[in-house]
Image: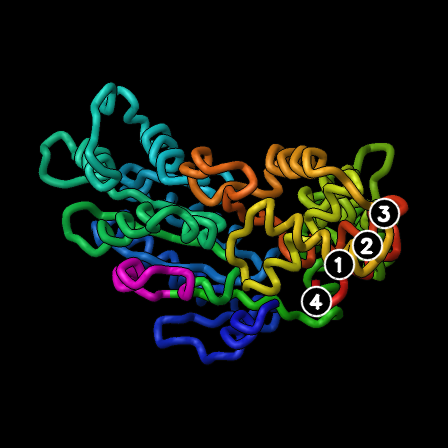
Amino acid sequence: MNKRKAQDARQPLGENVTKVWMSPTRDPSSPRAHLLELLRRTAVHGESNSLLIVGPRRAGKTTLLRCVLRDLLEDREARKNLLQVHLNGLLQTNDSVALKEITRQLRLENAVGDKVFGSFAENLAFLLEALKKGDRSSSRPVLFVLDEFDLFAHHKNQTLLYNLFDVSQSAQTPVAVVGLTCRLDVLELLEKRVKSRFSHRQIHLLSSPTFPQYLERVRAQLSLPDTFPDVQFAEDWNAGVKVSRGSLTGRSGEDSGRVSVSKPAIRPADVLEASRLCFADAKANMLHGLSVLELCLVIAMKHLNDVYEGEPFNLQMVHNEFKKFLQRKSSSIYNFEPPVVMKAFEHLQQLELIRPLDSSAAKTQREYQLMRLMLDHSQIMEALQKYPHCPTDIKQWAASAFG
């Protein structure tokens, strides 16, 4: 975590922040009720809102939103009126792609047809206008969910965020914009004009149960109730859960999926395997198949991110950082010709471990195209621990505080 992130994590939360510890000793209905009421006011009463759900990975951000949407859609009027658009910063990497996905999810491809729009704002305004009800008196409310919200802040001029927040402030179309992010300093990423249109409502999910509390929560999820019809089976099952509790570090859904007629109980080995599958990081796993050169380029990018606090980089900068490592090593074992380095860099882009800063990068000489690393420090270090026969000097280079 860089200095700016650490300082932001220590700052007191603002007035519009709901700070929540997701532990069994606290009532989780508070953030749920708050978010439910906010979305109900959009879906039923036509009130526009914007909000961020902030917290570390696996803190329950997506689960909270899904539970709230399930509760909301039990209301017949909300279910009839509300439209949903789900975007992800990892998939919608620029505003053009995002706009096409919005059009697709709202099923307005035919309405747009071959029309040409002068700006993103005009296109979005046309889409929202096309959602007017039959009497043309009011628009259908739309919920925009932006997962990996911080990545949308890297779009050119933050046009998507600006227009969504701008619409949420106007009285023309009822929209709710809900962003999900792991970045505590996410507001620092927003341009001034974007930040001024955001409501600054935030829900912080801080996952901090003790290990005994965590075990008790999992035990409660897995245990069968006293009202279960087969009393003997329930007793045997709950006894098995109690035995397995010492190794419970996975999710109940995976565990119970291993139960069958021939294996009517959970074993500790099942729980450990389920844990391994649940917590496997797909991107970190991709690093296991990289060549040593590609791995070195990723480490060089990591050091550039540390030094320049997440600013974009290009191949020339990465290659220079790699050459510094080689000079300290005074060894030719990792020396590669520039075309080979270029090929490795392009392969990382194909794997989407790095991506161009914007679509205009295609017009720039390849060595100087600005890129962003789509991996964080923890993913890189985790992958290095499992990388087959990873050289010690490369591990030490990655773990060093300086490049």
Along the polypeptide, which appears first: circle 1 or circle 3? 3
* Label 2 neighbour load within 10 Å: few <14, some 14-19, many 20+: some
Q: Nearer the viewer, mark 1 or mark 3?
A: 3
Which residue in the protein does label 3 denote? 332
Residue 398: mark in rendering: 1
Q: Which of 82 and 155 is in front in this view?
A: 155
Left-right relation of 370 to 202: right
Mark 1 nearby-residue class (10 Å; few <14, some 14–19, many ≥20): many
Image mark for residue 394: 2
Question: Marks 1/3: CA distance?
Answer: 19 Å
**Residue at disc 1, secondary structure:** helix
Q: Distance between the residues labelled 4 and 1?
A: 9 Å
| Residue depicted at 21% across the width and 50% down the height | 46
What element does badge 2 sit on? helix
* Secondary structure type for disc 4: loop
Cα separation between marks 1 and 2: 6 Å
Q: Earlier in the sequence, mark 4 or mark 2?
A: 2
Residue at screen point 51% across, 42% down: 369
Residue range (magenta):
187-201
Q: Position of residue 177 (x, y in %)?
A: 34, 51
Amino acid type of the residue tagged 3 in the rendering: Ser
